[in-house]
Image (tube, helix red, strand yellow):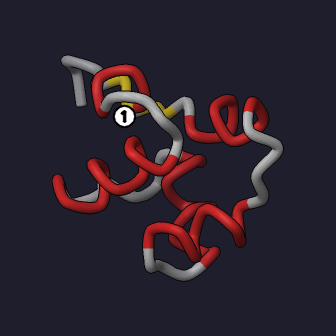
Amino acid sequence: MRTRIKEFRARYNMTQEELAKKVGVRRETIVFLEKGKYNPSLKLAYKVAKALNTTIEELFIFDEND
């Protein structure tokens, strides 16, 4: 899975730490999400998308082969 979290964070000039605080996780979780090393729960995906004023579908790109 790929994400566009970093791209959306840049639009709002938001740091990983700021996003992490908004959604209630550690900064490391945001790092892993951005690198595609962590698949979020639906609840976390929703919170991140909401914090970045977008949809889950816009933020997370699911590869059919994964």
Q: Position of residue 48 (x, y in %)?
A: 42, 52
The residue sitting at 57% across, 39% down in the picture is: 5
The residue sitting at 71% across, 71% down in the picture is: 17
Q: How crowded is the residue under tag 1: few (<14 C-alpha within 10 Å), some, or many (20+)?
A: some
Compared to 40, does 28 lie above or below? Answer: below
1 or 45, which is in the foreground? 45
| Element type where label 1 sits in the image | loop
Compared to 13, does 2 lie above or below? Answer: above
- Which quarter of the picture shows residue 43? bottom left
- Which quarter of the picture shows residue 19? bottom right
> In the visual, does 13 lie left or right of 28?
right
Q: Quadrant of the C terminus?
A: top left
> In the visual, does 13 lie left or right of 58?
right
* Number of numbered discs on residues: 1
Residue type of the residue flagged with mark 1: Met
- Which quarter of the picture shows residue 7? top right
Q: Which residue is mark 1?
A: 1
Q: Position of residue 22 (x, y in %)?
A: 53, 68
Q: Position of residue 8 (x, y in %)?
A: 63, 32
> In the visual, does 8 lie left or right of 48?
right
Compared to 25, does 60 lie above or below? Answer: above
51 or 45, which is in the foreground? 51
Q: Position of residue 34 (x, y in %)?
A: 58, 47
> In the visual, does 21 lie left or right of 10?
left
